[in-house]
Amino acid sequence: MKTLSAVVVTALAALLPVTAHASFDEAVNNAVEPISKAVSAFIFASVTVGDVSIPLIVVWLVIGGLYFTVYLRFLPLRALRVAFDIVRGKHDDPDDKGEVSHFQALTTALSGTVGIGNIGGVAVAVTAGGPGAIFWMVLAGVLGMSSKLAECTLAVKYRKYNDDGTISGGPMYFLEYGLREKNLPKLGRSLGVFYAVAIIFGCVGGGNMFQSNQAYEQFVLVTGGDASWFADKAWLFGLILAICVGVVIIGGIQGIAKVTEKLVPGMALLYVATGLVILAMNADKLPGAIGMIIGGAFAPKAVAGGAIGALIQGFRRAAFSNEAGLGSAAIAHSAVKTDKPATEGLVAMLEPLIDTVIICTITGLVITTTVYSPDMAEQGLAGVALTSAAFGSAFSAAEPILAVAVMLFAFSTAISWSYYGLKGFTYLFGEHPIAQKGFQFVFCGFTMLGCMVELNAVIDLSDAMIFILAIPNLAGMYLLAGVVRKEIEEFLDEVRAPS
């Protein structure tokens, strides 16, 4: 009996126009590229300021981050200690309903955000927007802490308890149930369906295909490049990765959490430690790199490397990296064991801090202190290949270490996003076990497909499918902002009260 992945390959081979002069991989890319360009053009509709196109969806995310940062009175800067106390279990109650601990929920969500966006995404931002994009990425991470706090608080408050003891939550549910409380049931249901459809497509693109694509590229690079045995066997690498993903995701959120609570801390420490060693080796170049980052962030040139271009690239890649304002991680956080929604909101705000402020900054500094030059794009360096060149320029062992990190990041992101997409699927079609297994098999098929398409096609499709989530998610967050502040203030009053 054929595996689903084999069936997918057979079907695609029958449908795609593979010629004698084009490999199967090229035919797949030729089929995907027009679709990705059309979808991306629609979602990233822009207004032009000077010579720079500003995507309206990025403006929507920036305004959301600013609004919740001010509305919640800069809470992430005031409540960091409380957030770390919750992660280490200080406020746990073993009798609370839920499937995973606060730490497991955080690592599961981080496994979905600490991924290729931290490696290849930063490189894309620097290539397109110059070093100044790093500054705006960090700022986006800081603002994203408030967005993440709000969406995850709502996800826990309005989650659904299933008959089998599992939990379903996320923007779909807080949009429907929360807006029903506001006497807006039709709007809530419509936005919930919109979000569920988008998260299904998003999990296939940015949460899956982009990850496997970059993992494959890095693997081929460190095993000989064009001379690698896998250089023309993207489908085989994808099949192996798909099988590994499938073995984990069949266990549901508890199985995923058991893997991520062990995998995420280790892979993050491996990557951060390697990056810090490289920065220490190039300590004399750090002042100059920081100068380029700050200077580039406010450069007057109205081009891709200027202030507006750097800002747009920084916020765009930061959102792809930490997903603040998109609501995806809220799906994982909603499964936490707690009866106080604010506790998980406070835990969730640590994600952008770890993911963007720390890890993305290290990636950006490594690039700018090693191989950065204004003509990198002309040299063919982009995405994870650029980050790999930066790591490899420091010492030979760095590239294999980065390759391991890329594989782990891609794997962990894919297993988390499979859960996000599954919850969108069950919101639309119900909690049917057989249908859920079918969705998981199809997801694994797209893991393999992601290895077969070129970087540009994958990035365009991934960005589009991920960013569209911000439309319904932030709309619901604005309408339910009062609920968020009430939940947080009540919990913090309880924490401050004398015992």
Image (cartoon, rainbow, N blue to C red):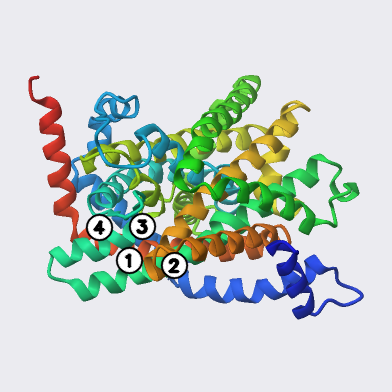
Give the residue at mark 1: 472
| Tag shown at residue 438 | none
Q: Quadrant of the N terminus?
A: bottom right
Give the residue at mark 2: 198
* Disc 4 from disc 3: Cα separation: 12 Å
Element type where label 4 sits in the image: helix
**Residue 146 rendering spot, x and y as whole percentages:** 29, 44
335 over 94 or under it: above or below: below
CB under 8 Å between discs 4 and 2 = no
Nearest-to-viewer mark from 1 and 3: 1
**Residue at the (23%, 73%) spot, across then down:** 187
**What's under tag 1, amino acid-wise?**
Pro
CB under 8 Å between discs 1 and 2 = yes
Q: Quick one: label 4 or label 2, which is nearer the N terminus?
A: 2
For label 3, count other residues whose C-alpha is less than 10 Å away and answer few (under 14), some (14-19) or many (20+): many
Element type where label 2 sits in the image: helix
* Disc 2 from disc 3: Cα separation: 16 Å
* Disc 1 from disc 2: Cα separation: 10 Å
Q: Quick one: label 4 or label 1, which is nearer the N terminus?
A: 1
- The residue at the far left in this view is 498
**What's under tag 2, amino acid-wise?**
Ala
